[in-house]
Amino acid sequence: MQSQRGYNCEKDTSIFLIESSVRQSRGGVARYVRQMVRGLHSRYGHHFVACSGLAGLPESVRRVRLPLRYPWRYTSRLLYEGTTLLERGLLCAVEKRLKPSVIFSPFYGPLASLTPQVFTVYDLILHLFPEYFPAKARRLELEHMRRCFLRAAAILCISNSTRTDLFRFHPDLDPKKVHVVPLGVSQLFYQPPIPTNSRPYFLFVGTRFGYKNFDRLLEAFSLSGLAHEFDLRVISPQTPGAEWSAAERDFILSKDLEKSVKLHVGASDQELGSAYAGAVAFICPSEYEGFGLPVLEAFAAGTIVACSRTSSLPEAGGAAAFYFDPLDVQNIATSLNEVVQLDAVQRAERVREGRRHAKNLSWDKCINTTCEILESVAHKNSATQNMS
C-alpha cells in the first residue's frame, strides 16, 4: 500500500501493542488480544512489539515487559495518579527507545506522551451498570477511560451498538476518529468434535452475574417444562465465584433441577467448540453485550441460537437467531420451546443461515481493517512531522 507521498505503510509502520489488564485468560477480550498480536506480528514482523502478560502468544514476537496495571490502583485517587505518572514515565522511556509509529492499546493502557495512540472500546458497562461496581473504583476507571478517549488518534468499537453507546456518554468525541471493527470467529469452531451419548441440552456460556441475566434463564428453563427431556449445560470461566452461588443452588434444588442443570468451570476452546456443536441451542440471555462473540462461535459450530433482542446481539445474531425479551421470563421460556419444536428442515436452514452469517465476520477481516486504521494514523503522523 503506497501513498502519494511515498509512504510505504507496511514497511514504514511500527506498532507497539500494550495489553495491560485482561481479567479473563479465555474471555472475549483475551481472544481479541491474542488475535491482534498474532495478526500484527504476521504482518509487520520485527516492526511489531508487544507488551502483554497473556499466555499462548507466538514465541517469535518481540516483547517488552512493563509493570502495568497494579490491581489496587483504583482504590484511591493518590494511588491512581501515582501509578498513572509511573506508567507514563516507563512508557515514555520505551517510546524513545523503540520509536513506534503507533501505540495500540486494546484495553485502556497507559497514556503515551510522544506517539499517536489507538484504543479499542468493547462496551460501556461501567456507564450503564454502575450498581455492579464499587463507586470509587468506577469513578477512577471512568476517568481513565475518558483520558484515553481524549488522547486517542483513533478509537475502535467492536460493534455499531458500542459506537452508539460511546457517543451517548461521550457526545463530544470526533466521529471521524471512531471506527467500527467487528470481531471474528476462530476456525477451530467450524469443525469441532460433536459429543455423543448425552441427553439433549441447551447451552449457556459465560459469567453469570448481574446483567448476564443467568437467573432469569434458570427460571425460564424451569418454567418451560423441558427439564424432564433436556439439560441446561453451563460453561463458566475459571474465575473467583465461578461455582454455584448459594442462591443458584437453592433455586436448582427448589425446582428439582439438580439432575438437569450442569456446570462446567474452565473449559478449553476445544471443549467449548464440542459443547456448542452438541447443543440443541445456545442461549444468550444477557441484558447487554458489546459484541456477543459466543453467538458467532455457536453459529460456526452449527448450533441454533436464541438470544436477547438488545444492545449488540441483533448484530451478532442477524436473521439466523431466535430473539426474546431478556427481562421477560415467560418470553425466554417460549423461545426455548420454539427451538425444540423446529423440524429437521427448519433446523437445517437456521444452521445454514447462522454459518453464512458467521463467515461474514472473520478474524482476518478484523485484523486487516485494524491494520488499515493503524497505518492511516501512522501516515498522518508522518505527514505532520514532515510538514513541521
Image: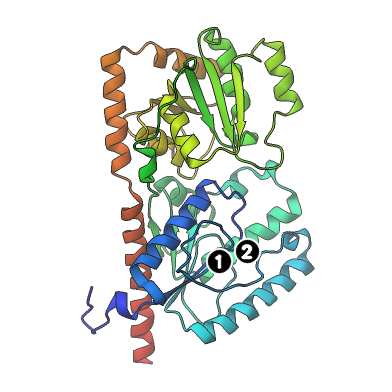
Place of residue 218 in the rendered image (x, y in percent of width and height, measured from the top left): 60, 20
Q: Residue furthest bottom?
A: 388
Q: Residues within 10 Å of mark 2 (few under 14, many from 20)?
A: some
Q: Residue at x 65, y 74 (%)?
A: 87
User: Residue flagged by tag 1: what amino acid is it?
Assistant: Cys
Q: Residues within 10 Å of mark 1 (few under 14, many from 20)?
A: many
Which kind of residue does numbered mark 2 sit on? His
Which residue is depicted at the point 71% across and 14% down?
Answer: 253
Residue at position x 31%, y 60% from top?
A: 368
Q: Secondary structure at mark 2?
A: helix
Q: Is residue 285 visible?
A: no
Q: CA distance from mark 1 to mark 2?
A: 6 Å
Q: Residue at x 35, y 55 (%)?
A: 366
Where residue 288 appears, x then y in whole percent? 53, 38
Instruction: Write down the quadrant of residue 297 in the picture.
Output: top left
- The quadrant holding residue 20 is bottom right
Residue under numbered circle 1:
148
Q: How is the image coloured?
A: rainbow
Are the two marked residues, 1 and 2, in contact with CB atoms closer than 8 angstroms?
yes
Is residue 250 at least partly visible in the picture?
A: yes
The answer to whether 254 is drawn above or below residue 371 in the figure is above
Give the camera-side residue of 202 and 45.
45
Q: Secondary structure at mark 1?
A: helix
Q: Position of residue 334 (x, y in %)?
A: 47, 14
Q: Which label sits on residue 179?
A: none
Q: Is residue 263 left or right of residue 365?
A: right
Q: Which residue is mark 2?
A: 144
